[in-house]
Amino acid sequence: MFVFQSGNDLINDFEDDSDTIRIAAGLLPDGSGSIANILDQYAESTAGGVLLDFQNGHSLFLARVADMSTLEDDLLFV
């Protein structure tokens, strides 16, 4: 399990359906929303993985993740 609260972090060894990422809900402007909507709004696929950019200097990069939809059951906003 990886806990993300602030700053800019990188996860190199994320494994779908094995790892869970807990993200502080306070990073979201309204503090709520479905995982799919949050990915739609804050996630971007890049050549090297998926970038979750929550603005104001808070981002999380998941290296070697090719498909954002695989994250839907691995993210928790707390």
Image (spheres, rainbow, N blue to C red):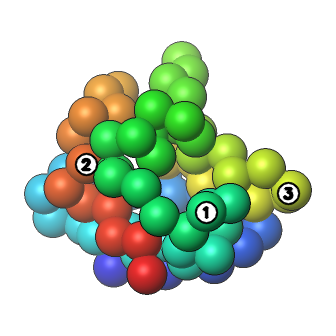
The answer to which image quadrant residue 33 occupies is: bottom left
Give the residue displayed 35% in from the left and 33% down from the top: 68
Q: Position of residue 58 (x, y in %)?
A: 75, 60
Q: CA distance from mark 1 to mark 2?
A: 19 Å
Cα gap from disc 3 to disc 1, whole angstroms? 17 Å
Callout 1: helix, strand or loop?
A: loop
Q: Residues within 10 Å of mark 1 (few under 14, many from 20)?
A: few
In the rendered view, does 2 fall on the left or right side of 66?
Answer: right
Q: Earlier in the sequence, mark 1 or mark 2?
A: 1
Given this view, does label 3 or label 1 mark the residue nearer the observer? 1
Give the labeled residue for mark 2.
72
Number of the label disc, if any, that sits on residue 57: 3
**Crowding at mark 3 (Cα within 10 Å: few <14, some 14-19, many 20+):** few
Q: For the N terminus, give its image quadrant.
A: bottom left
Residue 49 at least partly seen = no
Amino acid bearing label 1: Asp
Mark 1 touching mark 2, by CB under 8 A? no
Circle 1 sits on which residue?
Answer: 30
Q: Identify the mark nearer the N-term, 3 or 1.
A: 1
Is 32 in front, or is 27? 32
Q: SS at mark 3? A: loop
Of tags 1 and 2, which is closer to the observer? Answer: 1
- Which residue type carries mark 2? Glu
| Position in image of residue 41 (x %, y %) | 54, 36
Residue 34 relative to residue 57: left or right: left
Badge 2: how crowded within 10 Å, few (<14), some, or many (20+)? some
Vertical position of residue 10 compared to residue 72: above or below:
below
- SS of the residue under disc 2: loop
